[in-house]
Amino acid sequence: MARLLFTLTRLRVTIGYTSVLLAVAATLLVLGPRAHDIVVSHMSTNLHNLLHGHFGTLLGSALVTENGPIYVWLPGLACLLALAELFWRSGRLVFTFAIGHVGATLIVAVGLIAAIRFGWTPVSVARATDVGISYGAVAVLGALTAAVPLRRRSAWIGWWLAVGLAVVAFDRDFTDLGHVVALTLGMLVSLRFSSVERWTPARCVLLGVGASFGYLMLVNTGLPVIVAPLFGVTGAVAGHWAARWRSRRSPLTAVPVVIPEPVLHG
């Protein structure tokens, strides 16, 4: 019991954030669909709100969700956040989530402005609802790259990037593009994190549940869930062989050291 309580004290951000999400979802459920639609409209990080200076939506949108019943996906999110917080503490978890949520939102917004200006997408996209935890969660998933053993890291990167890009090519939705941007940002952030030397069975379970949750977030908008692994496996194999090819062509080669034999006089 003491060990469990100690572990829970290390998960302050995970417990606090999931509790807030649960409280907000319960409140909106009690208030009814009309109140829910109004809150989503005001908290959405779409172009209309951002261009009118409603930058508070960058924070509020991470507290309101439209991902279906919260009891279905909240355990997966909790496992993903908990694993990252156990590895790298609360501050880095918050930093990674914020980089993914805010960074991907702003990058996608710039892309949408260009797409509307050149006529590649209708103007109505500027008022599309865009709330939820997916950008931040996918960034945390990308940051877990640092926890993957080095010999498997390239395959891990190849798998997730291939799945994300396949979904974008199949569905061509700005939310899917935002997921790929957030995933890439998380992988870049992982370059600053320390490697993980020890995996316990409990952490392996957290990774399994959290990674499954991240996978469903990536593919739930268009690409069939059964088809996506084909692209993932292809990307993993490509990443693995690319890493092997790079290691073979590395200019750092071992130089043999020759120790001269002693010369005996007399």
Image (cartoon, rainbow, N blue to C red):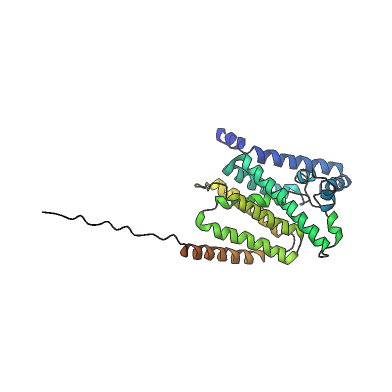
Task: Please state the horizontal and vertical placement of residue 74, each as a whole percent of the image.
Answer: 70, 47
Task: Please state the horizontal and vertical placement of residue 243, each as a whole percent of the image.
Answer: 52, 62
| Number of numbered discs on residues | 0
User: What residue is rendered at 50% in x and 57% in y?
Assistant: 151
The answer to whether one can see residue 218 in this image is: yes
119, above or below 45, in the image: below
User: What residue is rendered at 64% in x and 51% in y?
Assistant: 186
Left or right: where does residue 202 sit relative to residue 173? left
User: In which quadrant will I find the N terminus?
Assistant: top right
Task: Please state the horizontal and vertical placement of residue 128, each as a whole percent of the image.
Answer: 83, 55
User: What residue is rendered at 82% in x and 46% in y?
Assistant: 43
Which quadrant of the figure has residue 54?
Answer: top right
Task: Please state the horizontal and vertical placement of residue 127, each as a whole percent of the image.
Answer: 85, 54
Q: Residue furthest top?
A: 2
User: Could you say which is closer to the camera, residue 88 or residue 118?
Assistant: 118
User: In which quadrant will I find the C terminus?
Assistant: bottom left
User: Could you say which is closer to the camera, residue 199 or residue 264?
Assistant: 264
Left or right: where does residue 213 sit relative to residue 238? right
Q: Residue furthest front?
A: 265
Q: Residue furthest left?
A: 266
177, above or below 51, in the image: below
The answer to whether one can see residue 223 in this image is: no
Left or right: where does residue 224 sit relative to residue 154? right
